[in-house]
Amino acid sequence: MLPASLFCAILVFGAAAHNYTILSADIVWSLPLWLMLLSACPCVIWMARIVALLSRQSRAGRLDELSVIPAGRRFIFTTVCQVVLSESDAAWWLDLLRKVLAGIALLMLLMGLCVALAIVDRVDWYELASMLLDMLLLALAIPLESRQSGLLACSLGIFFGIRAPGALDRASAAFAVFALLQALSYIVAIAGAVLLNVPRLWLVCGLFLLLREIAIVMIWREVMRDS
């Protein structure tokens, strides 16, 4: 799990570095996309394991038996997710990687801002406030995206893991919905900034995080409603 995730992370970093040579500073607008690609590998593995585990328990009738305990199915679902995410401490190490990336990104942006302020004669306070807001949302998006992707993967893994068997493979369906929601959250965030005529990174990151949070809440409510 962890070696595969780190290998995929190296590939994503390499692709991002290559694209930086083409896009230069404009690459920051594609940051949510790169963050989602960074989360893709571990989330796919987590979803596959959650779906497989819950599917086996559901077919054996154990979920119905366990659901009668006082804690209910909510406790069962959260326990399953914790067990899967805690395997080999992968979630902890990946979260630490995100925090380090957030710190490095914030430091680089602060250094760039200090250099820019040192060479200008007159400070535009509105632009400065907007840049500081960009930096804040950017620094928050790096670790929060990882946690949101993990929650989204767990919610979808549970949702499809407890479905009745059908013609469509449940793990494949979870992967497809996960990829669709990831893509839509980025596309709608960019479209929202364009329609509002506020082409600022803070708005893109804010909309991106908000849309994903709404998706997580809606899927979890659907899971608990069906339970």
Image (cartoon, grey):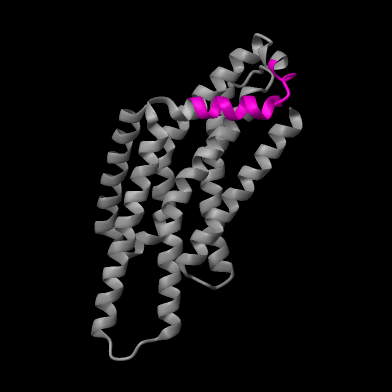
Report the side of 73 relative to 92 (left or right). Answer: right
Pick the residue in front: 146 or 89: 89
Question: Quick check: 68 above or below 213?
Answer: above
Whether 70 is among the magenta residues is yes
The rendered magenta stretch, by its main secondary structure, is classed as helix
Whether 121 is among the magenta residues is no
Q: Which residues make up the magenta segment?
A: 66-83
The residue most toward the front is 70
Question: Quick check: 61 above or below 113?
Answer: above
Estimate the x, y position of residue 10 in percent, counting from the top left: 27, 40
The residue most toward the bottom is 121
Report the side of 31 relative to 217 (left or right). Answer: left
Residue at point 66%, 22% (across, down): 162
Estimate the x, y position of residue 60 in percent, counting from the top left: 65, 8
Count of all numbered marks drawn on residues in the image:
0
Q: Quadrant of the N terminus?
A: top left
Report the side of 117 relative to 187 (left or right). Answer: left
Residue at point 52%, 29% (across, down): 82
Estimate the x, y position of residue 132 in percent, counting from the top left: 41, 72
* Picture quadrant where residue 129 is located: bottom left
Estimate the x, y position of residue 126 in percent, counting from the top left: 45, 83
Residue at point 56%, 43% (across, down): 181
Residue at point 45%, 65% (across, down): 201
Pick the residue in front: 127 or 25: 127
Q: Quadrant of the C terminus?
A: top right
* Picture quadrant where residue 174 is located: top right
